[in-house]
Image (cartoon, rainbow, N blue to C red):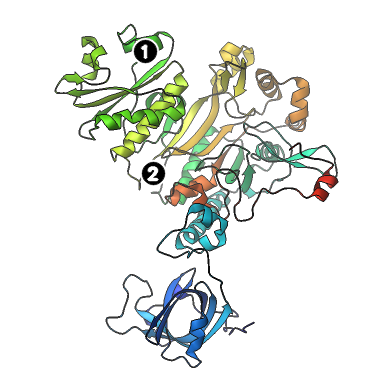
Amino acid sequence: MTIPHIGSNHLFKTKNCGQLRADHAGEEVLLSGWVNKVRDLGGVYFLTLRDKTGIIQLGFESFKADLGILKELSLESVIQVKGKVAARPEGATNKDMPTGEVEVHVEDLKILSRAHEVPFLPHGKIEAGEDLRLKYRYLDLRSDKLQSMLSLRSEMAKRARMVLYNEDFTEVETPILYKTTPEGARDYIVPSRVHPGRVYALPQSPQTLKQLLMIAGTDRYFQICKCFRDEDLRADRQPEFSQIDIEVSFSTAEYMRGLASRMIEKIFDLPAGFDIPIMSYSDAMRDYGSDKPDVRFDLKHQDVTEKFKGCGFKTFADIASSDGLIKAMFISDKDGEFARKKIDGFTEIVKPYGGKGVAWFKVKSGEFTGGISKFITDDLKDHFNKADGLWVFCADPKKSVAHACANALRLHLGRECNLIDPNDYKFLWINDWPLFEYDDEAGRLFAAHHPFTSPKLEDFDKFKSGDVEIAKTIKAEAYDVVCNGYELAGGSVRIYDTDLQAQMFKYLDFSEEEAQRLFGFFIEALKYGTPPHAGMAFGFDRLIMLVGKTDNIRDVIAFPKTTSATDLMSSSPSKAQAVQLEELKMNFKS
């Protein structure tokens, strides 16, 4: 083992590689880092040394030991050098490097850790495949991109904390081993050795816990916490994720919007006084077909269902007469013109959302051509003959399918026509959500959010009626923060009255016994003086995705999982050892 030099600062280095500049010339420095590149120019050696802060070139004109040591160096080995900072000769500077005006003339070099041949170079010109990079994540994390993401994540956590600390919030940690409760996704469960046959659940969110903190008098709570959901994954979703969790006593939805605005202003460096614009859930669905619309570009949907009632195009006529939905969009020739082949490709865009196809026709100088143009009567032409361009239609007997297909097609057209500014952020506060969703197959109501969300004050009488048909029309005091097509945060005003909470459980078909089994501790707590309260949670990983301008959530997490919820680096999940299963008194069927 090589004994390194120790600087007067008690570190293996007195400067970082990336901080050296021309005004450091003549200064003796101690540097430590990774070998980034080695060049042998006919016995004249140059080496670049890298640490988190950047790269510096090393020269060996002043080297006092045997230059043979340089031949032992492998890329990514960790070394320490001692030498003097010198200005590079005229014509030898590198303007592409922040440290390109100087180099270090090495007098002594120590190999601290010799690297074997690495599977890929984290700073190589050719990027390795994602599976290989995930398997050797610690190597991939040496890249500038991922190190900058980790630094960005740290900075954003600090900014969020400072906003909340400045508003007198208390940071409280809540348990990871907790009770399984229905919150919309599958729980990850942890068997108990001490209590055979019983399990803990990893929290999908600290929902009941943070409400209990309000009952306990904490008043303003937050934490940046881990949450766990056993659900199918996407590019912006992981089985474990982090959220900025918030709860406030005696607060209104409007207070929560103001707090969210102040946090977003700080995190995204927006002008002082930023105020999140409001859009209702019904307007978002009407105009964009999504509860998290990307409003960086226009291309709004039009509901043209009524116009096609009794028309000659049987597909549309049937959908219009059966309480279905027909949505239209118009793309002006000024924004982009589409050949037939591209239009035919629209079907593949809507298929994943249940769509069977996309109807269309073109308008040019008042002439209607292509697609379903032969079914467009004179009455319909009066509506659609606005300008030259392409009309496209998404229709389905299920309104949810028509909305989803039209949203997917709108986003595709926005990208195809370059209507989206990638450097823009457009935030929305989506409110007036439905309180319930009704499942026709199950024949019952489900909570659109969670069973502790309050109905809007003006709907309290409807809520107390107990009528399922009336309940379908009740709005929730719930809200989401969305940005560029992503949900950034969600929350609601909570039920704090025991009678209202009991009525909610009835709507959700929970028997008294089931409600007691799942939420008995919480129902009991509500009896002892519960303040009105509201809360929300920001998806922290997704927030960093947006700030960091990446579309892959794995880029912003130090050690992420794949889309099949596996960790390629540690080969997890893995099989339990026989002795562990014996201690837990359990076994697997397969």
* Position of the N terminus by quadrant: bottom right
Mark 1 / mark 2, whichever is N-terminal: 1
- Asked whether disc 1 touches disc 2, contact meaning CB atoms under 8 Å apart, the reply is no
Closer to the camera in the image, 454 or 57: 57
* Residue 222 x, y percent position in the rendering: 61, 46
Asked where in the image residue 299 lies, by quadrant, the reply is: top left
Please say if 536 is above or below 112: above
Q: Is residue 581 left or right of residue 226?
A: right
Residue on which disc 1 sits? 315
Residue 334 rendering spot, x and y as whole percentages: 20, 34
> Between residues 229 and 8, which one lies in front from this camera angle?
229
What's under tag 2, amino acid-wise?
Tyr
Between 550 and 281, the residue placed more toward the observer is: 550
- Within 10 Å of disc 1 (Cα), the crowding (few <14, some 14-19, many 20+) is few
| Residue under the point 55% across and 33% down | 252
Q: Which mark is residue 425?
A: 2
Where 262 sits versus 88, above or below?
A: above
Is residue 289 in view? Answer: no
Q: Quick check: can you spot residue 495?
A: yes
Q: CA distance from mark 1 to mark 2?
A: 39 Å
Task: Kindly state the secondary structure of the residue where label 1 is placed.
Answer: helix
Residue type of the residue flagged with mark 1:
Thr
* Helix, strand or loop under label 2: loop
Locate the C terminus and report the quarter of the image it occupies.
top right
Decide: is 479 above or below 397. Answer: below
